[in-house]
Image (cartoon, rainbow, N blue to C red):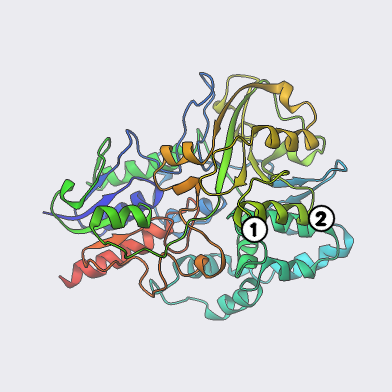
Amino acid sequence: MLDAVVVGAGPNGLTAAVELARRGFSVAVFEARDTVGGGARTEELTLPGFRHDPCSAAHPLGVNSPAFRALPLERHGLRWLHPELPMAHPFPDGTAAVLARSVAETAASFGPRDAGAYRRLVEPFLPRWDTLARDFMSLPLTALPRDPVTLAHFGLAGLPPATWLMRRFHDERAKTLLAGLVAHVMSPLNGLATGAIGLVFALAAHARGWPLARGGSQAISDALAGYLTELGGAIHTDYEVKRLDDLPPARAYVFDTSPTALARIAGLGRYYEGYRYGPGVFKIDYALDGPVPWTAEAPRVAGTVQIGADSTEIGAALNAAAREGRAPDRPFLITVQPSVVDPSRAPAGRHVFWAYGHVPNGWTGDLTDAIERQLERYAPGFRDRVLARATAGPPELAARDANYVGGDIATGSVAGLRLLLRPRPTLFPYHTRHPAVFICSSATPPGPGVHGMSGHNAAKAVWRRLRQT
């Protein structure tokens, strides 16, 4: 009998398996698709030689993850590549604000009236960032806070809505960049704790940047899988699990799945009945015959580029998708241009690029024209560079990854308290009512992103249980 079986070979499932194997438990992973990866994959979606990331591409939380940093992933092929700028946010007038590694450079891009306010916001946390990140990403009861004073200070700044945090600034440049950071988790700007989201992304950039994995996000998953194999763990692909009886006998079963899939497979009935999914996304992967022709200079050297004219436009786009049940006329876009820093991702002189906008959960329309109209506002002539495109709306994303219910790449709404209390209001979010069944997906704290911390935290709950039995 195995000690633990993990269902789902995304970053969280693989991290959970690694953490258990490191502690001497026998582990096997079962994955429905033919390769490991989940939200961290790389595929040729458009043309031969163009290697795209179907979901995640830039990894501020990955490079800062306490779980990943404790593992020898570089020995298994993971290399972080840092663009000249982690992120840029262009404006219609041809200028741009930036999120640079340097706090001073970032503050200067906001203008003199807001430079000091930004420095006062982020600089107190940076000397304690590693401890803060561990405390923030380890909650709830998986570890006692190492620095409760700094964590409380962070909570005072971050628990209110982002709209409150934006009041610290006079001009729209800083407000817009912060609004865009919050929008990465598809939450309306006036939601509880959305200020913390913006702060975490900003601090992560200043601490270690927003890198990309050399060769694509698949490198993260492959490194985790390689280390697991080295530890003696087994990985089985092309193995769809429909019920617990499909799995070999084990002392614990750990699910890197959506809560609704877990309830169906494990026979938990209505245990997660109140769980809600958030907005979906419409994503386009592009093969380009040259770099994106940004008008502003900063986006030309940035790994990630946010697109939204101002905080009002960004807020309206989020509200349309999350609350009004319609696709926004001017979607807020998150775009990533991997080949700016990694020429191996495309043939010589060519580029890969992706963009996505938010849409209602389960939306079946086509956002291509709206996305490209937005891109043309900041990169005139963009459409002329397109060699091929691969589009994926909510149905396609859900078919590609069963965790993305209705196209929700966060595996659950993060609006309001659902950012903190997921997947149920409980102090033990990784447990279920079945004593041998656990959940480790992005539906659990600390939530979405390629960081492995949900798997790391869940593994702690599992090994504590295993040592009791």
- Residue at the image point whose x is 18% and y is 48% from the top: 247
Q: Position of residue 202 (x, y in %)?
A: 66, 58
**Residue identified by numbered label 2:** 173
Residue depicted at x 15% and y 70%: 469
Q: Residue at x 58, y 40 (%)?
A: 282
Task: Name the residue nearer the viewer: 79 or 458.
Answer: 458
Kindly report the distance in space between the C-alpha atoms of the residues bearing marks 2 and 1: 15 Å
Q: Amino acid at mark 2?
A: Arg
Label 2 SS = helix
In which quadrant of the rendered view does residue 123 lie?
bottom right
Residue 40 can be seen, yes or no = yes
Image height of 38 relative to 137, above or below: above
For the residues bearing labels 2 and 1, Cβ distance under 8 angstroms = no
Residue 110 lies left or right of residue 186; in this view the side is right
In which quarter of the view is residue 142 placed? bottom left
Is 379 on the left or on the right of 8, as rendered? Answer: right
Whether residue 55 is situated above or below residue 430 in the rendered picture: above
* Residue at the disc numbered 1: 182
Q: In the picture, residue 350 is in which quadrant?
A: top right
The relative height of residue 291 versus residue 120 in the rendered view (above or below) is: above
